[in-house]
C-alpha cells in the first residue's frame, strides 16, 4: 500500500509571480505545510524585466524546501505563458499550480497526497478547495465579493493539480489568454474534450482578498475580450460547461446603446427622443449601481466608487467584447505542439 501512495504523491509545484509581497506568505505556507515534499518547486518570475536574472524573490521563506526551488525568468509572458514554462521544467508526474497570493493549509501537502492517491488513471486534474476570508463586522465590498467568487469557481489554477501527461496531450495553457482570466477554464475544457476527467479534492487553500484601488473593476472589463475568445473556441455552451456566470454583457450593451443613442439624437436636434434614450441610460446605470451598492457596506467611499465605475463599466465591457470578437474572429484551437521553454532559470 505504501509504494502506490509514494508514487501518487510524486508531484512538483509551479508558482508564477510578478514579485508581489504576498509571495513570501505563499512560500512560507508551502514550506511549513505537513506532508510529502514536492520533488521540485519552480517559481516563475513573470516580471517584464530585462536580463540578468533578478534574485530578489523571498525563496528563504520556503524554509527546508529552499533547496528544491528553482527560479525561471520569462520577461513577462502572462500567467498562461508563465505556467507553460514552469510545468515544462518539472520532472514529476503531477504538477500542482499555485498562485502567488494564496496560502496553503497547514496539512496541505498531506491532503494533496491523498487527493492524488485517490485519482484513478482517467483523472487528469484534481482541484483544491479555495477559501476566501471576508471581513467580519461589516458587509463585503464589491471587490471582496468578486474575489469570493473564486471559492465557487471550477478549475481555478489558484490551487489546481494536473498530470503532466495530460498537459502535454493538450498543449498546456493557451497563451492567447493574456490575463489570469479564462485560461484555466479553457485548459480544463480541452482536457475534458481529450477524454480525461477532473475532480475536486479535499485540500484547503486560503485566498486572501488582495488590496486594490477603486478602479479595479473597470480594468477587469478587459476580460470580456477573453470571453469572446472562449466563445470562438468552445461555442456558446462553454458557459454551461464551465458553470461560469454569464455576467451582464447584454444589459451593458443595452445601456450603452441607450447612452450613445441619446448623444446622437441630441446632436440631431431630436430633444424628446434624446431625453427618452437618456432616461433609459440613466435608469440602466442606476439599476447596475444599486445592484452593486445594496449588498455592500454602503460607506461613502464605496458608494462613490460604485457610482463612478457603474457609469464606465457598460461601455468598456461592450468595447472589449467587440474588440475581442474582431481580434479572435479567425482563432483556431490551441496548437498542441510544444516548443521548448525560452525562460532563463537556475537553481536559487
Image: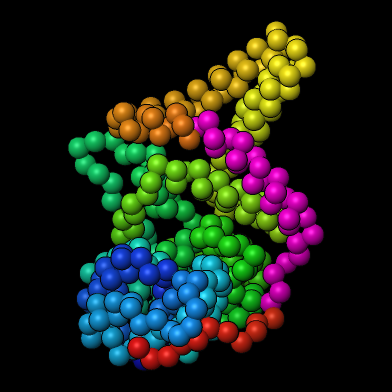
Rendered view: 253 above or below 209: above
In the image, 320: left or right of 110? right
x, y percent for residue 178: 58, 62
- Residue 233 shows in this picture: yes
Of residues 245 and 4, the one drawn nearer to the viewer in this rendering: 245
x, y percent for residue 321: 66, 46
The residue positioned 64% from the left and 30% from the top of the image is 256
Of residues 341 and 140, the one drawn nearer to the viewer in this rendering: 341
Q: Which quadrant of the figure contains the C terminus?
A: bottom left
x, y percent for residue 175: 62, 68
- Looking at the image, which residue sits at the far right? 330
The residue positioned 25% from the left and 44% from the top of the image is 135
In the image, 235: left or right of 207? right
The residue positioned 69% from the left and 27% from the top of the image is 260
In the image, 193: left or right of 22? right
Q: Which quadrant of the figure contains the N terminus?
A: bottom left
Rendered view: 235 above or below 139: below
Which contiguous range is marked in magenta?
Answer: 310-336
- 318 in the magenta segment: yes
Q: Quadrant location of residue 247?
A: top right
Rendered view: 238 above or below 196: above
x, y percent for residue 246: 58, 42
The residue positioned 62% from the left and 36% from the top of the image is 315
Q: Which colour scheme is used?
A: rainbow
Instruction: State whether the magenta stretch is mostly helix, strand or loop.
Output: helix
Q: Quadrant location of residue 176?
A: bottom right
Q: Quadrant location of residue 27?
A: bottom left
- Residue 163 shows in this picture: no
- Looking at the image, which residue sits at the far left? 137
- 154 in the magenta segment: no
Amino acid at each position: 500500500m505504501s509504494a502506490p501512495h509514494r508514487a501518487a504523491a510524486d508531484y512538483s509545484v509551479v508558482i508564477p509571480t510578478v514579485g508581489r509581497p504576498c509571495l513570501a506568505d505563499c512560500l512560507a505556507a508551502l514550506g511549513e505545510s505537513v506532508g510529502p515534499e514536492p520533488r521540485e518547486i519552480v517559481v516563475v518570475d513573470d516580471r517584464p524585466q530585462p536580463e540578468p536574472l533578478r534574485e530578489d524573490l523571498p525563496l528563504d521563506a520556503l524554509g527546508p524546501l529552499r533547496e528544491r526551488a528553482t527560479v525561471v525568468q520569462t520577461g513577462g509572458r502572462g500567467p498562461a505563458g508563465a505556467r507553460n514554462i514552469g510545468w515544462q521544467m518539472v520532472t514529476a508526474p503531477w504538477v500542482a499550480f499555485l498562485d502567488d497570493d494564496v496560502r496553503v493549509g497547514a496539512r496541505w501537502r498531506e491532503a494533496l497526497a491523498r487527493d492524488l492517491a485517490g485519482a484513478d488513471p482517467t483523472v487528469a486534474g484534481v482541484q483544491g478547495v479555495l477559501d476566501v476570508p471576508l471581513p467580519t463586522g461589516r458587509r463585503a465590498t464589491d471587490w471582496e465579493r468578486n474575489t469570493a467568487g473564486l471559492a465557487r469557481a471550477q478549475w481555478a489554477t489558484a490551487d489546481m493539480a494536473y498530470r503532466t501527461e495530460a498537459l502535454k496531450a493538450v498543449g498546456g495553457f493557451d497563451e492567447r489568454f493574456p490575463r489570469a482570466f479564462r485560461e484555466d477554464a479553457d485548459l480544463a475544457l480541452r482536457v475534458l474534450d481529450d477524454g480525461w476527467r477532473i475532480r475536486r479534492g479535499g485540500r484547503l487553500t486560503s485566498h486572501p482578498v488582495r488590496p486594490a484601488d477603486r478602479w479595479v473593476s473597470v480594468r477587469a472589463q478587459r476580460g470580456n475580450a477573453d470571453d469572446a475568445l472562449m466563445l470562438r473556441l468552445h461555442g456558446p455552451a462553454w458557459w454551461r460547461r464551465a458553470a461560469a456566470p454569464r455576467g451582464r454583457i447584454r444589459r451593458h450593451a443595452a445601456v450603452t446603446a441607450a447612452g450613445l443613442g441619446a448623444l446622437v439624437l441630441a446632436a440631431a436636434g431630436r430633444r424628446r427622443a434624446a431625453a427618452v434614450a437618456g432616461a433609459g441610460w440613466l435608469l440602466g446605470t442606476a439599476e447596475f449601481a444599486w445592484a452593486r451598492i445594496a449588498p455592500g457596506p454602503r460607506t461613502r467611499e464605496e458608494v462613490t466608487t460604485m457610482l463612478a465605475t457603474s457609469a464606465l463599466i457598460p461601455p468598456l465591457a461592450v468595447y472589449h467584447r467587440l474588440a475581442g470578437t474582431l481580434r479572435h474572429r479567425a482563432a483556431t484551437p490551441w496548437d498542441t505542439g510544444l516548443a521548448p521553454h525560452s525562460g532563463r532559470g537556475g537553481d536559487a
